[in-house]
Amino acid sequence: MDEKVTVDGLTFVPYITRDEIAAQVKRVADELRNDIKGKNPLFLCVLNGAFMFAADLIREVGINDAHINFVKYTSYEGTSSTGKVKEIMGLTEDIEGMDVVIVEDIVDTGLTASMMINDLKKRNPRSIRFVTLLHKPESSKTGFKPDYVAFTIPPKFIIGYGLDLDGKVRNLKDIYVIDEQD
């Protein structure tokens, strides 16, 4: 893990290591696998931030006949949520009667998660489960609670492992937090 990362004049320090991430991905995958045993789920990856987590999680769950699709929403500008959720790329697949597993990078205010679930319920899936890499319960504006959480964190801005700052640094293998010393 690199000591510090500087992006757009902001300095970030290590927060969660790739080994800690891998251990939690395995734990969440084990829980999810037990809960969806015997089902052919549709994993719905929320782009762009969840792509690394989704890839690792889906491989770890190991259900060979699972389906994978992608949606894209946005609510962030820079380091903070705008409070407005915008659908960029929606689901075109028929999900009636399917077991849907939403895979998200972070649940902050809960607005995106709540909107997605409400939209998906209108399409009559058999079930919807929500998995997130990171959950910031202190930032919730909706009271939404994910079904599966890898890490519960305080309301700090983080980057790496798919999470970005204006499209940059998604490639980092570890997760970093803004350096409070700066």
Image: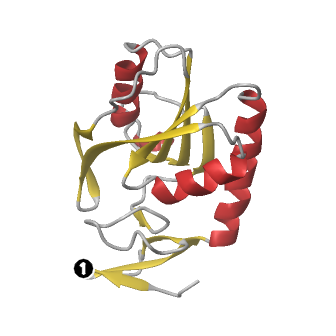
Q: In the rendered view, does 68 fall on the left or right side of 27?
A: left
* Residue in the foreground of this view, choosing between 156 and 103: 103
Q: Residue at x 77, y 43 (%)?
A: 30
Which color scheme is applied?
secondary structure
Dividing the picture into quadrants, the one containing residue 46 is: top left
Say which residue label 1 marks. 8
Q: Is residue 132 above or below residue 143?
A: below
Q: Is residue 59 above or below residue 19?
A: above
Q: In the rendered view, does 29 fall on the left or right side of 99?
A: right
Numbered disc total? 1
Q: In the rendered view, does 4 fall on the left or right side of 168?
A: right
Dividing the picture into quadrants, the one containing residue 41 is: top right
Q: Residue at x 56, y 55 (%)?
A: 55
* Position in image of residue 17 (x %, y %): 62, 72
Q: Is residue 162 above or below residue 11?
A: above
| Type of the residue with mark 1 | Asp
Q: Residues within 10 Å of mark 1 (few under 14, many from 20)?
A: few
* Residue in the foreground of this view, choosing between 148 and 10: 148
Secondary structure of the residue carrying tag 1 is loop
* Position in image of residue 122 (x %, y %): 37, 13
* Residue in the foreground of this view, choosing between 61 and 19: 61
Q: From this viewpoint, which residue is outermost toward the front?
A: 65
* Position in image of residue 94 (x %, y %): 41, 21
Dividing the picture into quadrants, the one containing residue 140 is: top left
Q: Is residue 136 above or below residue 181?
A: above
The C terminus: image quadrant: bottom left
The N terminus: image quadrant: bottom right
Q: From this viewpoint, which residue is outermost toward the bottom?
A: 3
